[in-house]
Image (cartoon, grey):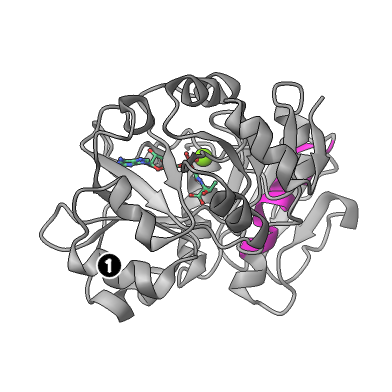
Amino acid sequence: MAQIGTDLQAAKAYLEAGNVVGIPTETVYGLAGNALNPDAVLSIFRVKNRPSFDPLIVHTDSLSKLSQFVTHIPDAARLLAEACWPGPLTLLLPRRASIPDLVTSGLPSVAVRIPNHPLTLRLLASLDFPLAAPSANPFGYISPTTAAHVADQLGDQIPYILDGGPAQVGLESTIVGFDEAIPTIYRLGGMAPQLIESLIGPVAIRTHSTSNPQAPGMLSSHYAPRKPLVLLQPGTSPPPGHRTAALAFRHPFGGLSDAHQRVLSPTGDLAEAAKNLFAALRSLDALDVDIIYAELLPNLGLGQAMNDRLRRASVQP
Ligand code: TXA
Ligand code: MG
């Protein structure tokens, strides 16, 4: 069973030996390995049960190291990196051959980001390689926002989980690429599109592509709890029933016990709701109920990314 702790030396030693370790970030916990070591990268795919066509994000701690992994940084990407990193933003950039094919699933671009978490930034600064890290959940399940979430599902397969407390953003990073006529968001996430547009001007949002998705995080099988999840329009209530659980934005639903529902933010704060979303879904999924209802959020700012996750997690009518 994985040890959980805050021992940076232990985490560093495991990573240097080619092992895979749970690491905290501000978005969600990652399952990290040496991005330059194909065997370590292979272990990440194996532990997560992730298909090898789904590429990984490379994490580093400083902009100056970026040129070791990418051949070119477009002006818009540099602007975003300087304004938003460390932060919940991933950039798709043309990769150098130093990054193994396995990391990018053979794509000519590599996904990179500087995560905003003090422990993980110190860990990255102490290593002489970057860390490849997908979210530390079994493929297709809800991403983990605490060390305990990681231990629950992957604890028997990894030696160590670095505990950095609950993730402060709670949604995976926003992914932006620069291969189209205008910068394009391929995954909505912890950095709102409006914020990105305020820095670099208009962006396209292309998170729904059917064939050969640029970012397989777009597939609808992602982020799902095990129980069927049914969406509710804002302000509507689930049907009464004692085998029913529900996720509410601001106000608890009548006709449902407190134990069977979670309120994401009584004050209506979208950032607070985002921080609580995945833990709330996990705890509802663990209840002895047959179905989970989830109220959609106002579709602005982080609400857009949360609604995207809820839609992908929901049963299709
Ligand atoms: O917030 C996050 O991004 C977290 C933390 C741990 O950093 N990581 C994360 O990784 O969410 P993961 O593997 O669960 O999602 C990464 C997404 C996948 O949908 C993958 O397909 C996409 O990034 N991706 C990675 N490299 C790509 C590339 N070269 N081109 C297009 N999409 C890419
Ligand atoms: Mg993931």
| Residue drawn 33% across the image and 28% down it | 100
The chief SS type of the magenta part is helix
Residues shaded magenta: 274-287
Number of numbered discs on residues: 1
**Residue 207 coordinates in the image, percent (x, y):** 32, 49
Residue in the foreground of this view, choosing between 59 and 272:
59
Q: Is residue 98 on the magenta stretch?
A: no
Q: On the picture, is 32 further left or further right than 159?
A: left
Residue 99 in view in this figure: yes
Residue in the foreground of this view, choosing between 164 and 70:
70
- Say which element carries label 1: helix
Residue 161, above or below 280: above
Residue 278, above or below 41: below
**Residue 64 coordinates in the image, percent (x, y):** 36, 61
Asked if the beta carbon under badge 1 is closer than 8 A to the nearest atom of ligand 1, the reply is no
Instruction: Locate the N terminus by quadrant.
Output: top right
Residue linked to disc 1: 78
| Residue drawn 78% across the image and 32% down it | 152
| Residue drawn 74% across the image and 34% down it | 160
Q: Which quarter of the frame holds ligand 1?
A: top left
Residue 239 in view in this figure: no
Residue 12: quadrant of the picture:
top right
Q: On the picture, is 262 further left or further right than 187?
A: right
Circle 1: is it few (<14), some (14-19), or many (20+) Cα within 10 Å?
A: some
Residue 277: quadrant of the picture:
bottom right
Residue 98: quadrant of the picture:
top left
Residue 118, above or below 37: below
Q: On the picture, is 161 further left or further right than 214?
A: right
Q: Is residue 278 on the magenta stretch?
A: yes
| Residue drawn 27% across the image and 52% down it | 206
Residue in the foreground of this view, choosing between 76 and 39:
39
Residue in the foreground of this view, choosing between 234 and 65:
65
